[in-house]
Each structure stands twice: as structure tokens, then as C-alpha cells.
Image (tube, rainbow, N blue to C red):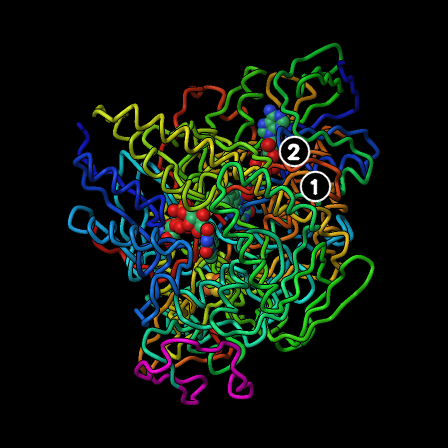
Amino acid sequence: MTRRLSADVAVIGGGLVGSSAALALRRAGLSVILIDKGFCGAQASGVNYGGVRRQGRSAAQLPLSQRAHQIWPRLKELIGIDGEYQRSGHLKLARTPEDFAKLEHYAETVKSFGLDLELYTGAMAKARFPWLSGNIAGASLCPDDGQANPRLVSPAFAKAARDAGAIVLEQNAVHAAVRANDGFALQAGADCEITCRFLINSAGAWANKIAADFAEPAPLSRIYPSMVVTEPLAPRLPVSLGEEGGGFYCRQVTRGNYIMGGGRGYALADPDFSRPSTTAAQSVMKRATALFPHLAGAHVIRFWSGTEGQLPDNNPVIGPSGTTPGLFHAFGFCGAGFQVAPAVGAVLCDLVTSGETVTPIDAFSIERFRNMSSQHNEKKGTHNETVE
Amino acid sequence: MNDTSPAVVVGAGPAGICAAKTLVAAGLRPIVIDEGLRAGGQIYRRPFLDDGRSATDLYGSEAAKATRLHREFDALLPSIDYRPQTLVWNIADNQLHLMANGDHQQISFQNLILSTGATDRVLPFPGWTLPGVYTLGAAQTALKAQGCTIGRKVVFLGSGPLLYLVAWQYLKAGASVAAVLDTAPFTAKLNLLSAFRFDPRLVLIGMSYAARLVRRGVKLRYNVRPTGVDGSQHVEGLSFKSGAKTHSIACDAVAYGFALRPETQLADLAGCSFRFDDRDRTWLPVTDETGRTNRKGVYLAGDGSGIAGADAAEISGELAALALIQDSGAVADPGRMSVLAGARRRKAKLRDALEKAFPFPENWFEQVPGETKLCRCEEITVSSVVDTLHGNDLRELNRLKALSRAGMGRCQGRMCSAALAEVLSSTQKLTLTEIGRLRAQAPVKPLPLSLHEGGA
Amino acid sequence: MAAHHSRSQFQRHFRRDEAPIPFTIDGIAYSGRRGDTVLVAIMSVTDRLRQSEFTSEPRAGFCLIGACQDCFVTLACGMRVRACTTPLEAQMAFITRESGNE
Ligand SMILES: Cc1cc2nc3c(=O)[nH]c(=O)nc-3n(C[C@H](O)[C@H](O)[C@H](O)COP(=O)(O)OP(=O)(O)OC[C@H]3O[C@@H](n4cnc5c(N)ncnc54)[C@H](O)[C@@H]3O)c2cc1C
Ligand SMILES: Cc1cc2nc3c(=O)[nH]c(=O)nc-3n(C[C@H](O)[C@H](O)[C@H](O)COP(=O)(O)OP(=O)(O)OC[C@H]3O[C@@H](n4cnc5c(N)ncnc54)[C@H](O)[C@@H]3O)c2cc1C
Ligand code: FES
């Protein structure tokens, strides 16, 4: 029997982007259906590294990122849990003088955004952070950046949306979405027909199919960042750590496990699932023991990976469709969407309710790809920007 | 045979040994990898150091088989590439990732027989993490491999053939057996009558343990549910319910378990499909009756493809090797294969009957208090798991793991996945099939962070 | 820690006359026997291997076949070994403080 549902807004994809949009829209009084082909928060949003950082983002992303920065401390009020969010600081290391020059240059470029970056030369960094070892040419600290637990945060946004009255359909893939009457008609799962006035495409690494259905494909490829976690160890690493070039990042969670990442994994036969590459995992392990000799005797207990959408200019697509009124896209976060996602949800809510937003998003328009070929193959290793 | 990379056998228990022997007989020189110090697997585990005990002391009724298998394996040594103390920790892209001596090694394979065996299946109850509480297999391993008992006065608890066997082995070694507490009702043992049809020797031997225990004055009790281990630093006793009454026994160790769970992580990483198996109450890799999987060149044998016991492991090891030989274009004796397949089917029937005689304890969690730890690695309690699944209306096992943390620790869910599945299915009134299975992740066991790049 | 719990959990029934192998726990000297695993050596002189990470409960291994990973112990050099599958070697020095603490 066909199940018919109707709402003001349908959101395709219950990652942190879609779920936070759903929650914001419910709070703005609109009726919402949030649809996920699997479980909300089980893809990139639930398995990422958990870095909640502004440092390192392009100037174009910083206003959005700053908006998110205001939302993160309010998680408890918004979704009922703090999600282990803490402003631990984000320390970005430079291995070489050239890399340190890049950090200095970055600090100069983003001065006006108020990240309050602190620069340290190699010796100063080791004095300030005595747990550091190995070759370090310098470091940049963003004291108010931090970390959170994606496994908890992302599903909790979906749950909060549901508790706020959104209809949440899990294990229902949207396989067709078309313009109909004044809005849209979707087909989901085996027997679900959904109509809505507004449509949000927040389908993560899968979003391009929907964009293409509305005649505006983007050159979206997929990346599978490799992650490694150790057994629980005595607390020692107070900050979330990154490296210029993105080859290594690491944080220690409150329970003591070190979570570290770097390099790329690969997709399984079912490309919705991925595995870390052992080569990547091993180079991460090697770098960890070089930086933290106290970890030499520790064990890693698990590797994993997740599926993330990548765009060629390392910026996401966020904003109205160029072809279809009432459709909004938000995808392709290039390994850095966790921190910004709550603000992306807020921006999407602005756009749906008022057609505009105070947050500058022009750089993320899907129109920028209008003349690009839709044929874009996944090029391994071409992007090695920081994923955290 | 036209391929160049040698066949690889993972696991040197009865299944792996028989597989290797069959491959060697066909002119191959397989690589045989086993994590243990000495070949033999669980049942035919050899002491670290020979300590004067005879095969009969060590293996009782199975002494002749143990001796034969050990001898056969030793005779294979010149014809195989044997890698003891080597862990296979991942399989990806027809590569095995190994750790030996703290070094990382990688070997490629075209043909692989996974005979990774099983481990004890356990369920939590109050006090199960206390020093002095061990699995039945652990109690036996302490004795077999090390000549030690896990305590002076031991209670044996649970369900499965190992319960009576290990209790008897302890008594024979000179330990005091405080009691044998069977979680199944006595009437379940009537099913041994139907098992008798398929393997009278095995059933008689099994029954003789119980008889000997009784003769030596050991109390056997049925239909037991443990209520808790007494003691705060180590075991001082065990409290349990039998019928409506609660009892307490003084002891300094408890050995318990509920039959076995197969080691299937490597099959999962190799890309094998899985199906739910009612008898084993878990997901098993899909195979045909010879052990072929959906992955070309990957074969399964022994308890790792479904719990069937040591004799069946020998049969399935030989069968998998013959299938491999046949698939590589060489001639394998089809008559032999059908004899083995028939024997394997009879073992499966025996297993059906034994499972009824030693059933899994249903509704276990009805009497387990919420503050009991369900996951011993992450120290997650039963009630926190239940709260998580209620709070989020969870219906799938991987989601429950992600949100509750149970199963995320060092053991990769080996010790808690059965419990996690029971709690999820009973709380949500879903079948074990509906809630799915935990996906395997590399490394299948912890690796030192300092794992070095070694030779090939 | 181990020093305060000199009650032995495991009982030796065989291999009692093998050559002794000296080791220490938190600096206190003990001896095991040739052919011991680390777990058996320690559990034959005390009643625990380590403290659990989150609730500091005593733990002493569980499966003895390398499956449960409950039996990791820390050596003074910082290395951690799985006690039930690691042969005891002379002069091994175990520490029972939380690993990573200075
Ligand atoms: C391993 C890893 C580490 C990372 N580390 C960080 C980090 O430290 N910091 C940071 O800021 N970012 C990080 N990221 C990036 C970040 O996780 C993502 O950018 C962000 O989660 C994207 O959110 P999303 O909601 O767009 O995507 P997702 O979470 O992938 O959600 C998309 C959802 O859409 C659903 N879907 C897809 N197609 C359909 C369909 N047709 N019908 C219904 N549902 C559909 C999917 O099932 C999925 O749940 C990392 C990513 C990965 C993979
Ligand atoms: C602790 C224990 C004690 C038992 N005692 C008895 C008994 O006394 N009597 C009885 O009838 N049955 C007993 N059983 C059951 C019996 O062991 C099995 O039915 C039988 O051994 C199955 O043989 P197998 O070859 O399939 O596996 P096993 O004998 O279990 O052999 C599997 C081998 O694979 C190796 N292995 C597994 N994973 C890896 C990996 N990732 N890398 C490298 N090597 C790996 C293991 O080290 C092991 O040696 C016991 C089971 C257990 C767990
Ligand atoms: S006791 Fe289980 S792994 Fe050592």
C-alpha cells in the first residue's frame, strides 16, 4: 500500500547537515520530512574524526564557520546532550620552515575574522606543549577550536528534529525527485510518495544524483579518509592536533582513546561502505609514534573510514538551485563539514523561510560549476587537504 | 595448477591441519599461518613446554586423535611454509596482512582457506569481570597448556559439552570442583538419546563425565541462573537460583560459558556473504557443502564456518582443500568429496541434537540487574545499553554499538556481541535476523602502534 | 598494587620443578617457571593483572586464548603485552600503574 506524506519541506539525507536543517525548520514552524536511505547520522556525519575547527578554512568559509562556532556551545539546549563538545584548542603543526611560513601567511590572511591564532616557533611550541616530540618547525594554535563526538552529535540532531515534530523516515532511499505543481514529488523506499513545497538536497556524497536530476550536476567525487583509534590511555593530549598539508591529525577523547587520521581509504563493492587503507593507517601510526614517543607501547584497536563528497575547489555547494525554484543544495564538504554543518542547517532554514541569509554563501553557489563537465572521475590523491 | 602464489591456510587446528595435509598430498606447498605458539588449535592445544603429562592425561578420550594430528602436522613441516605466532589481522584486495614478532608483513593469495575456529560464547551476569571468573575454555587452556587450575575450588557453570568435560578434567587434575551448574533443565539431556543415533561413542563419553563427577560427590544442578559472584576483589563464592530458591556456594573461581561462537571476522573482511544460522544463533559465512564461499578462491573450514566440533573440522578441512584443488583445475577425487560431504551432513545432525541437549539460556537478561557490565572492555552496563536503545528507538546492531559504545573495545565485540544481540532483540521484540550483525573491522585484534614494516 | 595482593589465584599442578624465571611486579621480585605465560606467572603469585580503565576494577584475564584482550599488562619499558599468549622471559618488569603516566 502506498504511503503518502506531505510537508512544507522534505530533506533528503539525514546527516548532520540535513538533520540540523530539519531541526531549524521545525523550530521555525514548518512541517518537515527528513529522509535517509540508511540511518540518520550513520554516514560521514557519524563516523568522522570529530574535529570542530575553524583554523585552516578558506576565508570564504569563515563567516559560516563562525556562525557554527556560536551554535556548538549550545548543543545541550538544542539537542539535549553536549556531544562531548569541548573547546580544547586546535594546534596545527608545521614540519618544515616552508610549512610554517604557510601557517604565518594564513594567520595574516584571516586576521579580520577573529580566530585569535597564536603562532609558535618550533622551540616555543615544544616548550608550550611538552608532550610534543619529533621534527616541528612551528605551530599555530586556535585556542577556541575544539572537538566533539560525531557518533553522538549527529544522530542526536536527527532525534531532536523528530522530537520537535519532524517525520523521520529511515531506511528509505529517495530514488526519484521531480518538480510537481507548486513544489516537488518524491518517491522513497518501496512505497512512499512525498510531496512538499521546498526540497533540500543534503545527501552527502550521494547528492549529485539529485542535483543531476534537476539538470545541474556538480563535479562531485568521493573520498574515504582513513581513521585509526587506540586503546584507552592516560590523558595527555589536551588539544586537537593537525598538520599543515593534512597528512596527520589526532585527538585524545575524554575516555582516553587517541583518534588519529590521515590518508585515504577505498570503497567496498557496495560503495556506501568503505574501508581504510592499511598503508594510510600505517603511515598515521608511524607519524603518531614520532610525535608522541609515549605511545610507542600502545595498541590500536580499530581502523575505519567514511564516505565524503569532494569538490574540485575544496568548497561545498550551499544555496538555491540554479535551475529549480524551491530546491536547495548543501553537499560536498570536502572532509570538513562536521564543524560547519549546524550553521549550514541554519542557513538552509533562512533560505527556505525568507529566501535569503545573513551569512555570505556566494562562493558556494552551484552555479560555479555550470560550464564544467559533469564527467568527473575520482582522482585519488589529487586532494590532500586537511580532513578534520 | 596455474597460479603462482601459494595457497594459504589460516589456522592450524584440526580443520587447518587437515586442509594443509590435503593440499600437500596434491603436490602444493601451502603457507600455514597460526597465531598460536604451537599447532593444534583449541581442542588439541599443546602445552607450551612438554611437562611429562601423557596424551591421555591431556586429551583423555581424544588422545589418539590428538597424537595423530600432531604427528601428521609435524610430518608436514618440510612440505609447508609454517608461520606460527603470526596473526592475520586484515584481508584486503587478495592480500593478507600479518603481524609476526611485532613486524608487519603482507602476502598475496589467490587461494585461501580460513579455518579460524571458535571462542567461548559468554553472557554477562553480576561479577563476571571479577578476577577468578574465567570462560570454560580458559579453565581448560590453563590446565592443558600450562598445567595450572584457575583456582583451588572451582564452580563450573553454563551450558554445553565443555561444562562437564572441563569439570571432570579439573577433578582429575586434583582441583576441587565445588559444583557443576547447568543452565539447562535436566529434561534437555533427554535429547542426548537422539544424538546417540549419530555418534554413540561421543554421547557415552559425554555422559560418563557427568556420571564420574556424581560418583566423586560433585553436586550437579540444572535449570540454574547465576545471580552474582560473591567478593569484591576476587571470587569468594557464587550465588545462583535454581527453581525459586537462591543458593550460595563458596569457591575461589568460576568457569562458565555457553558453547562457542565462530571466529568469522576474517571471512567478513575477505568479502564473504553471511546468513543467519538458527542453531548457532549467529551469522555465518555462506558456503556450499564443501566450504566454497561467494568469493572466488576463498574457502572456509572448521568451527569458523559454523560450530560443528573437532571431528567435523577435520572433515571440512579436507573438503575445503579438495574444493580448492578442484577449482584450480587439478583432479580431486569426487568420490572422496561426496563421502566427506555425507559425513559432514551427519555431523550437522549430531550438532542439531546436541544443541537441544545443551541449549542456549533463553531470556537470560530477565534476571540480570541493569548495573551489570554488558561490555567488559568499555565497561558499559546493561541499563545504559537499554536506555540508549530506548532513547533512540534503535533496531540495528551496528547503530546500537555506535551509540552505546558496547562492542567498541579491544575485543571487537567477541565477548559482548551475543549479549548485545540478545538485549536488542528481546527489548525491541525483533528477531536476531532482523537486527543484523556487527560488521568486522580491521585489525581483528589489537596491533602495536609501533608495528614496523617487515619483510614479505 | 600486586604487592598488596599476595594471594595466588592460579594453582600449579604440573611443571612445578621447572627452572625458575625471575620477574618483577612494581619492583617486587617474584619468580615463575620455565614454560609459563606471563598471565600464569603473574596469577600464580597474585590475584590480578591490572586495573580496568574506567572503573579501576581489578582484572585478571578471561579467555586465556587471545580473544578477549582483557589481559594486557604494561612493561616498565612502556611496551604492553597480551599476558595469556606471551611467554614469560627472565627479568620482565611489570608495572601496574596506568600506562602513559610518568
Ligand atoms: C572519516 C571522515 C573524517 C572527517 N573528519 C572531519 C572533521 O574532523 N571535521 C569536520 O568538520 N569534518 C570532517 N569530515 C567531513 C564531515 O564528516 C562531512 O563533511 C559532514 O559530515 C557532511 O555531512 P552531510 O550531512 O552532508 O553528509 P552525510 O553525513 O554523509 O549525510 C548524508 C546522508 O544522506 C543520505 N542519503 C544519500 N542519498 C540518499 C537518498 N537518495 N535518499 C535518502 N538518503 C540519502 C545518506 O544515507 C547519509 O546519511 C570527515 C569526513 C569523514 C568521512
Ligand atoms: C578454548 C576452547 C577449548 C575447547 N576444548 C574442547 C575440548 O576439549 N573438546 C572438544 O571436543 N572441543 C573443544 N573445543 C571446541 C573445539 O576446539 C573445536 O570444535 C575444534 O577445535 C574446531 O577446530 P578448528 O580447526 O575449526 O578450530 P580451532 O581448533 O579453534 O583452530 C583455529 C586456529 O586458528 C587460529 N586463528 C584464528 N584466528 C586467527 C588469525 N586471525 N590469525 C592467525 N591464526 C588464527 C587459532 O590460533 C587456532 O589455532 C574447545 C574450544 C575452545 C574455544
Ligand atoms: S585472557 Fe583473553 S586475551 Fe588474554
Q: Disc 2 is attached to a residue of which chain? A: B
Q: Amino acid at mark 2?
A: Glu
Secondary structure at numbered mark 2: loop
Q: According to the image, label 2 marks what residue?
A: B434
Judge by depth and name the residue closer to the eye, B111 or B46: B46
Q: Residues within 10 Å of mark 1 (few under 14, many from 20)?
A: some
Mark sitting earlier along the chain (2/1): 1
x, y percent for residue C2: 51, 83
Query: Looking at the picture, does residue B258 appear above or below residue A180?
Result: below
Q: According to the image, label 1 marks what residue?
A: B425
Give yes or no for residue C3 being in the magenta stretch: yes
- B456 horizontally vs A66: left or right: left
Judge by depth and name the residue closer to the eye, A39 or A248: A39
User: In this rendering, does residue B223 appear at all?
Assistant: yes
Give yes or no for residue A98 being in the magenta stretch: no
x, y percent for residue B96: 31, 44
Secondary structure at numbered mark 1: helix
Asked whether the beta carbons under mark 2 and mark 1 sit within 8 Å of each other, the answer is yes
Residue furthest to the front in view is B215
Query: To which quarter of the image does residue A349 belong?
Result: top right
x, y percent for residue A153: 66, 48
Q: From which residue to which does the magenta span run?
A: C1-30
